Amino acid sequence: MVSLDSLTLERVARLICDVDGPYERTGNQVERFLHRVRWPGDPQYDGSPRVPWLTETLCAHADDAAAVDRLLCRICDPLEYDGGIETADPIAQELNRILAPERLTVAYVGGRPVLGQLDQPGDAPSYGPPPDLHERVRRLAADTDTVNILMARADEASICQRNGAYALAIIGIGSFVEGLLHTFVTQRDEDVRNNGIVGRNGRRVTADRAGLDLLLVHAHRRKWVQTDAKDFMDKVRDYRNFVHPRHQIRHGLVPDLDTVRMCWAPVHALLNDLESAS
């Protein structure tokens, strides 16, 4: 769970507003920023001093781990700045200075900002399942049985990770992602439900036969998933095929804990994109 101290949230608010700085946001721009990260409560800027207003707005929903995750990543998302990653990276460094006492850090993995944990200062960030995953899946998948099955896949992947079954863990992560994307796409696209998805050869594939690669391509085409997140997920898709031993033999890879953590990282970025598109 991501839970930040009120002083940390105040420092984050100052960074977002950047009063008198090169990336200063007006009150209305701060409001629009919050809407882009789908901050709860539909905040409306009231004309009061920006930093206290934003601090209060953030503290009001500080217990929403998914919202905090999206907020922190969006602060230094290259999409936010005309200068792209060159502008976003110094902002990420300042954000990480603020987050250091919380043992959190935002790192760019596959070009996307992803929130990770620091076991010790100076350590590389580690990744596990996204925070508050059950509630986030529940918001994206309307059917209770589907939510339960998807969460069972994610939970079993975590169990495998904790017990050293790393190949099965990455297969489970890929299976969870495929199920989540299938649910998201079929719920939101009537044409896919009725007629299937157009494959790479131009022929339609029924939704029930669409694999992870085709689901990713379609979600990206519909702008539900950003390009970096799609490219980032390609490695997870590839590792998911380790369900076939011949595929793993061909790659010659023996997964370890770092491999599993690397596969969880794109799930964070993908989930943030799907939530922003909802």
Image (spheres, rainbow, N blue to C red):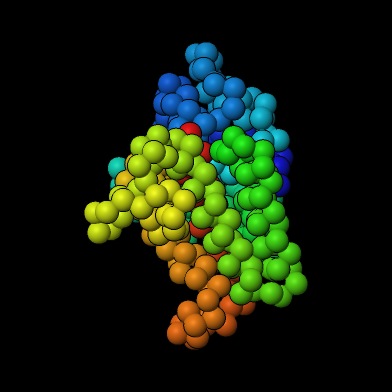
Q: Is residue 212 visible?
A: yes
Instruction: Find residue 6 and report its image quarter.
Output: top right
Q: Is residue 174 above or below residue 245?
A: above
Q: Please state the horizontal and vertical placement of residue 182, each as a whole percent of the image.
A: 49, 48
Q: Please state the horizontal and vertical placement of residue 61, each as a whole percent of the image.
A: 66, 30
In depth, the one of 153 and 112 nearer the eye is 153
In depth, the one of 246 and 33 nearer the eye is 246
Q: Residue, x 52% and y 31% (percent of image)?
A: 38
Q: Is residue 212 above or below residue 20?
A: below
Q: Please state the horizontal and vertical placement of residue 184, each as a whole percent of the image.
A: 49, 42
Instruction: Give the number of callouts.
Output: 0
Q: Is residue 128 above or below residue 226?
A: below
Q: Residue, x 51% and y 17% (percent of image)?
A: 44
Query: Does residue 37 appear left or right of residue 11 in this picture?
Result: left
Q: Is residue 160 above or below residue 177?
A: below
Q: Residue, x 67% and y 26% (percent of image)?
A: 60
Query: Does residue 15 appear left or right of residue 145 in this picture?
Result: left
In depth, the one of 185 and 235 nearer the eye is 185
Q: Is residue 122 visible?
A: no
